Amino acid sequence: MAVTDTYSPDDSTAENVVIRIAHLRKQFGTRVVLNDFNVDLHKGESLVVLGRSGSGKSVLIKCIIGLLKPDGGDIFVLGKNIADMEHAEMDQLRSRIGFLFQSNALYDSMTIRENLEFPMRHHLRNLSNSEVNDMVMKTLADVGLAHTVDMMPSELSGGMQKRVALARSLILHPEIMLYDEPTTGLDPVTGREISTLITEVQKKYSTSSIIISHDMHCVKMTGDKIAVLIEGKCYALGTYEELERSTDHNVKQFFE
Amino acid sequence: MIIFMQLRVNVTEFCIDFNCMKIPSSLLGFFNEIGAASRFVSRYFQEVVQPRYEVKQFIKQCFLIGYRSLPLIGITGFIMGLVLTMQLRPTLIAYGVVSKLPVMVSLAIVREIGPVISALIFAGKISSSMGAELGSMKVTEQIDAMEVSGTNPFKYLVVTRVLAATLMLPVLSVLSDAIGLYGSYLGVNIRDHTSLSLYFFEVFNTLKFGDVLPAIIKTFFFGFAIGIIGCYKGYNSSKGTEGVGRAANSAVVISSLMVFIIDLITVQITDVLGLN
């Protein structure tokens, strides 16, 4: 993959690339987690990053959102290298990216309404109370949980919490969604419901997505393209069907 | 602050260069902790003056920290005044100066016992809850979620809490002193009889500017230390639920110790300034 500091106008695919990860390197102490990782996410595309536990999948998306600082390489998000960004610029960029945490990360001292209002308090300060309320109710309705608006997160089941967390990450209508193991810890039925919901909101909100998962049902349902992360590198890249037919042992083991 | 920041770097180099000298890891850990805490404090002073100000959250924290600590600190102050009076009375009778009981009790409560006991109770209640709450938010990725949503979690969580603790403890301490003196008045009236006005006339006749002001000023430092230690421990906790418990526990222990250290320093300063 040819990588430059900025997008080349001659690159026919560049204008469609919303995230470009180039030669990404991240290590913790002496342990190298990501080593020369390269991948592009195109507009409207859903990319699943598949890998074993501890292979660095979550580290990858935390680097994209700026929660972790890469030790090397570049990450271009919506045309800008995040390494060059000031704090305020990064905050602005984050308003265009939704992030669904593995643990949901709902604020447990706040109601569902307050959880959804929280991202708006920073980015949409000019909205009136009724407009904020309309946005909250509409987004909650999109995940089928409008009736929970005044409940506390602890009163909801794991699947419902995941839906609320998804609603919170969608409230600012992001262009990019990052999902960190969205079905982990859920029973198979609820996991399928969440996978279906992800595909629905992707269509409705026209988002480009990176989904971290090792739940093969979720991978099959949500991924247009799958990147297999092995030993810190993008070991294989292709559609579900292409990778399923692969004879490579390292790839095959995920599909058995 | 700069010295401590440099110290951390130097300590790391020291480990590499002088590994053969077998520096105890606990000592290195201690200096690393001091360096990290210093950076945390310096970040607090940077963030506290920079807009945007989280006024609503600050008021909420004042309510949670101040109002909800009042019953505990009030009861403790009342018992402190009552018990101190009952304990001092036989000794003062033996020396024939029982009439000086309001003088002794008021000086003891206002200058030393009131602020210190209030601060210790405050440390037990507030510092541990800050440590546990922020620690729990850290391990459940709620702090990361705040950052991702564009809110500065340090300003929203740490600055508001530390500022509220710094401003609320002096208020609580004054209230505790007042309740303690009332408890002392009741203590006097268990065996003797005196009117409330006469008792408090004696108290206010005794207390001087130099008794009250340093005592109030030091409670600001107590409040700041308790808040910043609780938040530091919680904000930097790790290792899951075990880490949360450890953060809450160490927040109480260190902030209680800091109360005594600050008290020692302020006594020395007031002594030098001739306020003792």
Image (tube, coloured by chain):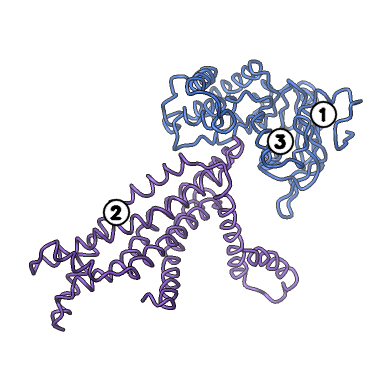
Chain colours: A blue, B purple
The residue closer to the viewer here, B186 or A178, is: B186
Question: Mark 2 is on which residue type?
Answer: Leu
Measured from the top left, where is residue A235 in percent x and y?
80, 35
Q: Are marks 2 and 1 in contact (CB under 8 Å)?
A: no
The residue closer to the viewer here, A93 or A236, is: A93
What residue would you read off at disc 3? A51
Q: Foreground mark, 2 or 1?
A: 2
Question: Mark 1 is on which residue type?
Answer: Thr
Which quadrant is home to the C terminus of chain B?
bottom left
Report crowding for label 2: few under 14, some 14 to 19, many 20 or more residues within 10 A (C-alpha).
some
Mark number displayed over residue B186: none
What residue would you read off at disc 2? B72
Q: Residue at x 19, y 64 (%)?
A: B200
What residue would you read off at disc 1? A247
B191 on left or right of A112: left
**Cα distance, mark 3 to mark 2?**
53 Å
**SS category of the residue bearing label 3:** strand
Question: Mark 3 is on which residue type?
Answer: Gly
**SS category of the residue bearing label 2:** helix
B30 on left or right of A238: left
| Disc 2: host chain | B
**SS category of the residue bearing label 1:** loop
Which quadrant is home to the N terminus of chain B?
bottom right
Q: Foreground mark, 3 or 1?
A: 3
Between discs 3 and 1, the one toward the N terminus: 3
B201 on left or right of A154: left
The residue closer to the viewer here, A102 or A69, is: A69
Q: Residue at x 43, y 50 (%)?
A: B164
How many badges with numbers are in the image?
3
Q: Residue at x 43, y 33 (%)?
A: A154
